Amino acid sequence: METPPEPAAGKLQILATEHWSLLASRSLTYTESLGRVNVFLAILSGAVIALALVAQADRFGATFIAIAILTLLVVLFAGFATIARLMQLNRDDYRWVVGMNRLRHAYLELHPELEANFMTSPYDDVPGALRTLGIDITAARGVGSALHVFQTLPGMLSVIVAAIVGAIGALIAVAIGLPSLGVVLAGAGAFVVAVVLMALWGSRSFRGSRDPSLEPHFPSPKT
């Protein structure tokens, strides 16, 4: 007859099983993120090659401008869809990190003597999640936050998509017969507007994803 496991050992086994489940979910999230980015970059590369062939045949005439605008609009749609999905995947990844922080807090409740061995956080609020993700909390409040945003996949693709918007704006300016300076200003203005709008989109996407299940149960201690 098997002896039942001790309560603490049973709890540790259950927590460890859930921890591995969350790790697998994070791995799938990263895999899909990279796959989405590869698909978008493949579409963009194919569009650029196709436009280069059209430019050789039409010598950048009216036909090339019309085809380029339509092609870049398709690439722009793919870019927006990719960024939207990446933002959702980032929110999912944040959820898995919060879940693992809660499990880590449970580990420390069972064995508080192990706290010095943990590099990641046992707290499930935003500072705790940032610590687990390896983001400096003090830098996240200043210039470092803006620089970090452009290092993420959604931030990097946002710049690329904004460049596509700028190219479409410049092509439209050429189509309506604006001078060279007007074409440059139209492209630059479209690029800046697109960057600002997507930055606002990303900010609202993160702030608007308030989920009752993500409310902190174990907030970081005040220092």
Image (spheres, grey):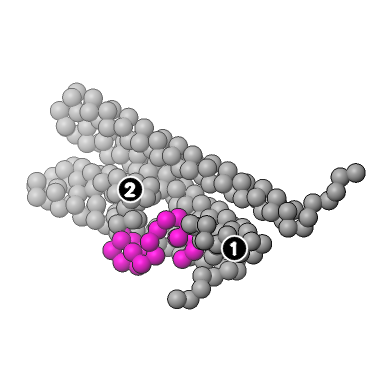
Quick check: can you spot residue 122? yes
Residue drawn at 26 percent across, 46 percent down: 163
Whether residue 119 is in magenta: the answer is: no
Residue at the bottom extreme, as displayed: 222
In the picture of the structure, the residue carrying the numbered disc 1 is 113
Is residue 54 or residue 120 the one in the foreground? 120
Q: Is residue 179 left or right of residue 104?
A: left
* Secondary structure category for the residue under label 2: helix
Determine which quarter of the picture holds residue 217. bottom right
What main secondary structure does the magenta stretch of the protein show? helix
- Horizontal and vertical percent for residue 28? 54, 41
Q: Which residue is mark 2?
A: 156
Q: Amino acid at mark 1?
A: Glu
Q: List x then y, in percent, for residue 51.
A: 25, 30
Crowding near pointer 2: few (<14 within 10 Å), some, many (20+)? Answer: few
Q: Which residues are magenta?
A: 127-146
Q: Could you tell whether 87 is left or right of 49 in the image?
A: right
> Which percent across, then down, holds residue 79?
37, 44
Q: Earlier in the sequence, mark 2 or mark 1?
A: 1
Q: Tell me which residue sits at (46%, 66%) in the image.
A: 127
Label 2, label 1: how many angstroms apart (C-alpha)? 42 Å
Q: Is residue 172 visible?
A: no
Asked if labels 1 and 2 touch by Cβ distance under 8 angstroms, the answer is no
In which quadrant of the rendered image does the C terminus lie? bottom left
Tell me the kind of residue under disc 2: Met
User: Residue at coordinates 27% horizontally, 28% vertically from top-left?
Assistant: 49
